[in-house]
């Protein structure tokens, strides 16, 4: 699933990022790498999300969230 389809309160694991080179490298420098765990703190509508990644909150726009592939983190409730 794409990150822009995520629900508030959900926890996800990044599987792939398909963004322009510079933007992808910037996100990786901030800690968004493959297998990184993220929590969705708020959904602003239209794919805009506030997420928590490695202890830091980020706001990401639709152009970014629709290009990040994630899967649900099934271990978050265990």
Image (spheres, rainbow, N blue to C red):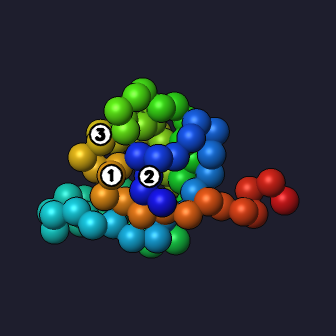
- Picture quadrant of residue 68: bottom left
Mark 3 to mark 1 CA distance (whole Å): 9 Å
Disc 3 residue crowd, few under 14, some 14–19, many 20+, Cα 10 Å: some
Q: Is residue 13 above or below residue 41?
A: below
Front one among 8 and 56: 8
Horizontal and vertical percent position of residue 62: 29, 42
Question: Residue at point 48% right, 42% down?
Answer: 51
Horizontal and vertical percent position of residue 30: 36, 56
Disc 1 residue crowd, few under 14, some 14–19, many 20+, Cα 10 Å: some
User: Which structural element holds mark 1?
Assistant: loop
Return the residue at label 3.
61
Return the residue at label 1.
66
Horizontal and vertical percent position of residue 1: 48, 60
Which badge, 2 or 3, comes first in the chain's sequence? 2
Disc 2 residue crowd, few under 14, some 14–19, many 20+, Cα 10 Å: many
User: Which structural element holds mark 3?
Assistant: loop
Horizontal and vertical percent position of residue 9: 63, 39
Which badge, 3 or 1, comes first in the chain's sequence? 3
Return the residue at label 2.
3
Residue 29: give its label: none
Asked whether, in this view, residue 57 is left or right of residue 66, the answer is: right
Asked whether, in this view, residue 19 is left or right of residue 32, the answer is: left
Which badge, 1 or 2, comes first in the chain's sequence? 2
Question: Residue at point 65% right, 61% down?
Answer: 73
User: Which structural element holds mark 2?
Assistant: helix
Whether residues under marks 1 and 2 lie with C-beta atoms below 8 angstroms apart, the answer is yes
Outermost residue to the top: 44
Outermost residue to the right: 78
Question: Residue at point 47% right, 32% down?
Answer: 43
- Picture quadrant of residue 59: top left
Front one among 51 and 1: 1
């Amino acid at each position: 699933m794409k990150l822009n389809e995520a629900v508030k309160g959900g926890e996800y694991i990044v599987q792939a990022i398909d963004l322009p080179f510079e933007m992808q490298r910037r996100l990786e420098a901030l800690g968004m790498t493959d297998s990184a765990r993220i929590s969705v703190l708020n959904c602003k509508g239209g794919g805009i999300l506030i997420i928590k990644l490695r202890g830091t909150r980020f706001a990401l726009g639709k152009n970014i969230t629709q290009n990040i592939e994630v899967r649900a983190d099934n271990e978050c409730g265990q």
